[in-house]
Amino acid sequence: MQELVLNQPVSTARSELVREAAQADARREFEERLAECGPLAYRVAQGVLRNTADAEDVAQEALLRAYKSFERLRDRSRFRGWLVRISFRLALDRLRSAKRREQRDTLWSQPTHLPPPVTAEDVAASNQFQGHLERALEELPEKLRLVLLLSAMDGYTIEEIAAMVGVPIGTVKSRIFIARKKLAEKLRCYANTIKMR
Amino acid sequence: MLCKHYKDALIEAAASGVTPQRELRAHLAECASCREALAQEQSLFAAIDSGLHAVADMKVPPSLLPRVRAAVDEVAVAPPRWGSTWFALSGAAVAVALVLAGGIRHNDPRTPPTNTATIRPPVEQVIPGRRTPLSSAGLEREDLIPRLPVSVAGNSSSPGGLASSKSMPEVLVPRDQEVLLARYAQQWSSHKRAPLVAQGADEVSVKPLEVAPIQIAQLDVKLLTEDGSK
């Protein structure tokens, strides 16, 4: 009687070794990217959320997704741009949750009752200015906000920001300019710096 | 010229950080109020930039990277996702089903075995409606009957063995295969089964099984009842 024998091919074990070696290489490369871009992911998230714990959660989620998609993100510039965008998107999603919004509204409702400072110098010196700035930043359109946040971070040129966001350099410049003007418009009402005759 | 005319130019100059144009510079040279307004605007933008740096360049908590590494480790050692698991299970189920089907087919005397290492008797093709008793081919039943299950299935475990039948079985074959069957039976009866065994096959595995003749006890004849006679 013929026997049916299920033989495990030798190539299976070999392919398993090859797969493990590839995974180790990917892990090593990812570790490099993690050290380089991990802080960036956190800062983008923090710029949106302004909450350390939430920003850390978002950065972790973004980096984990980056690891899962690392095969197509091995290129350094591509990885950074993808990470910035996904961190920004995840942070916005978290910010939009109803519970967080309620907490945030409670938090931000306090400074508005305080009397506005008189001059720009006073605004800058005021402890409330940062809160007003962050609130104004939150009200910016998303495209402007991301570019402005990246431009405010140390170490990134306009060209790098353009590569990260995936838009031309001129677009980055114009977005930064428009964003700063919008922020100034919102904050000027507190400072009333322009006194025209 | 009124200072209101230079409002936008002042803001543009403060926002961009570039040197004001010649006309604005000339106005600023003679208008202290606009110089003060420009200074305030520049101060405002400086404060904005400073605040943005504070927002954007927050200190990264030292726990971030270890947390990410731990999460990546969990992902790396985690079992495959449900989709791939389901795919693997489905594949295994299909493989087991195929193996079982192959085993049943291999052991089924009614099914012609596909492996060349087994004997392929021509008696399996049964065509309903064309019943041709084997006896009509001039064969001796006692030679053929106990050996057919052995030659087909290679073991005696087949539940459909002819020797276990209560009545004398009939092997039905198409008319065009009667000659082949007769030749096959003659070879078995004369123990010349070598041509039917593929080369390389284990001789022991195809050794005919010796089956004792069927012992039929004394028949107990009963009369039919009236209901049964109906």
Image: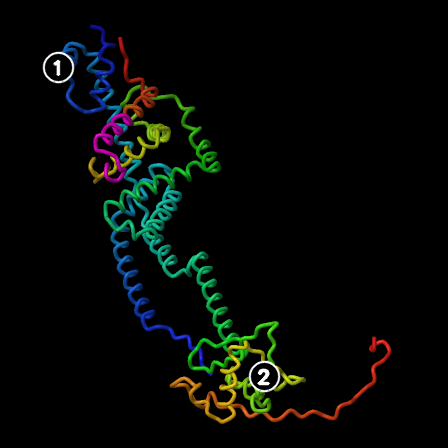
Q: Chain of mark 1?
A: B
Q: Chain of mark 2?
A: B
In which image quadrant can residue A2 be found?
A: bottom left
Picture quarter with the C terminus of chain A: top left
Q: Going 39% across and 75% down the picture, which residue do you hit?
A: A7
Mark carried by residue B22: 1
In this rendering, is residue A157 above or below B132? above
What residue type is disc 2 on?
Leu
Closer-to-camera residue (B56/A95): A95
Q: Going 21% across and 22% down the picture, which residue do you hit?
A: B14
Magenta segment includes A11: no
User: Disc 2, disc 1: CB below 8 Å?
Assistant: no
Mark 2 → mark 1, Cα distance in angstroms = 121 Å
- Residue A127 seen in the figure: no
Q: Is residue A28 left or right of residue B173?
A: left
Closer-to-camera residue (A61/A123): A61
What residue type is disc 1 on?
Arg
The overriding secondary structure of the stretch rendered in magenta is helix
Residue identified by numbered label 2: B134
- Residue A136 seen in the figure: yes
Q: Position of residue B153 (x, y in %)?
A: 52, 82
Q: Going 56% across and 91% down the picture, which residue do you hit?
A: B143
* SS category of the residue bearing label 1: helix
Looking at the rendering, the stretch of residues picked out in magenta corresponds to A162-180
